[in-house]
Image: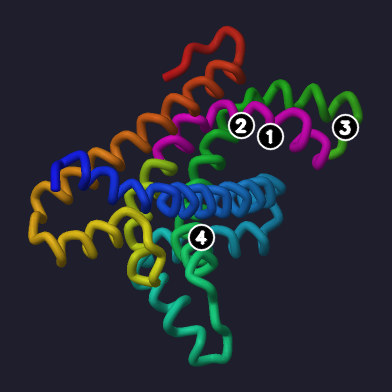
Amino acid sequence: MTFFDILAQLAQGVSYTVIVTLVCSSTGLVVSLILASLHRLHLPVLTACIDCYTYIFRGVPVLVLLFMVYFGLPGLGFKVPPLMAMALSLGLVASAYLAEVFRGAFLSVDSAEVLAAQAMGMSRIQVLWYIELPQMLRFSVPGMVNEFTSVLKYSPFAYTVGIPEITKQAMTLTSTTLRGVEIYLAVGILYFVIYRVCLVGVQVLSKRFQIPGISPA
């Protein structure tokens, strides 16, 4: 078996790796947008709850949370599918980090624009939706890329719940060939290729939605 044969066999798990990464990233993005937007409304009780959420989920190890969801919830009568377990663990951890990224990006929005919008009679929700949110998303692109990279790096945990992604394929192949060095070198190459392809896509979107007059970081 040549090195290219190893790559070809490992590539069978690429689709699962991409699916896990996209599902967890999408979960993190949606939840964090909701959390950051609600936090921006400055409602004391809600703000405290959101701060507590981000504090807890940024401190819990992804693997521990994954095992709690996948192996723990069935004991309470809730059987969770593997992909959903990843979304409820890695996705929610990502949402806690992204919520902090978005909260910082909100602070970059010019307060004069918010004041002008309020002077025109726009409600707080309208200011958030039409003025703050579009600019915040543009400012937060670097932070979102960084968190997407983290999600991709944590995606190998999916093998622990039976998802046959790249790492799972590598473990199976290693047990039959005993060529661990070559196999895991191939794993590293595949992950790097996935990362680069996704990064190019993000850079294209970043240039497309870049705020005029502001150079990208």
Identity of the residue drawn at 44% across and 33% down? 198
Rate crowding at label 1 as few (under 14), some (14 to 19) or many (20 or more) other CA atoms within 10 Å: many
Name above or below for residue 28 compared with residue 67.
Answer: above
User: What is the CA distance from the residue labelled 4 to the residue labelled 1?
Assistant: 21 Å
Span colored in magenta: 124-146
Q: Earlier in the sequence, mark 4 or mark 1?
A: 4
Identity of the residue drawn at 14% across and 48% down? 1
Which disc is residue 136 wearing? 2
Q: Residue furthest front?
A: 1
Question: Pointer 3 and pointer 1: residues touching (CB < 8 Å)?
Answer: no
The type of residue carrying mark 1 is Leu
Magenta stretch: includes residue 140: yes
User: According to the image, label 4 marks what residue?
Assistant: 92
Question: Pointer 2 and pointer 1: residues touching (CB < 8 Å)?
Answer: yes
Q: Nearer the viewer, mark 3 or mark 1?
A: 1
User: According to the image, label 1 marks what residue?
Assistant: 133
User: According to the image, label 3 marks what residue?
Assistant: 122
User: What is the CA distance from the residue labelled 4 to the residue labelled 3?
Assistant: 33 Å
Residue 70 rendering spot, x and y as whole percentages:
45, 77
Q: Nearer the viewer, residue 9 or 126?
A: 9
The type of residue carrying mark 3 is Met
Q: Earlier in the sequence, mark 2 or mark 3?
A: 3
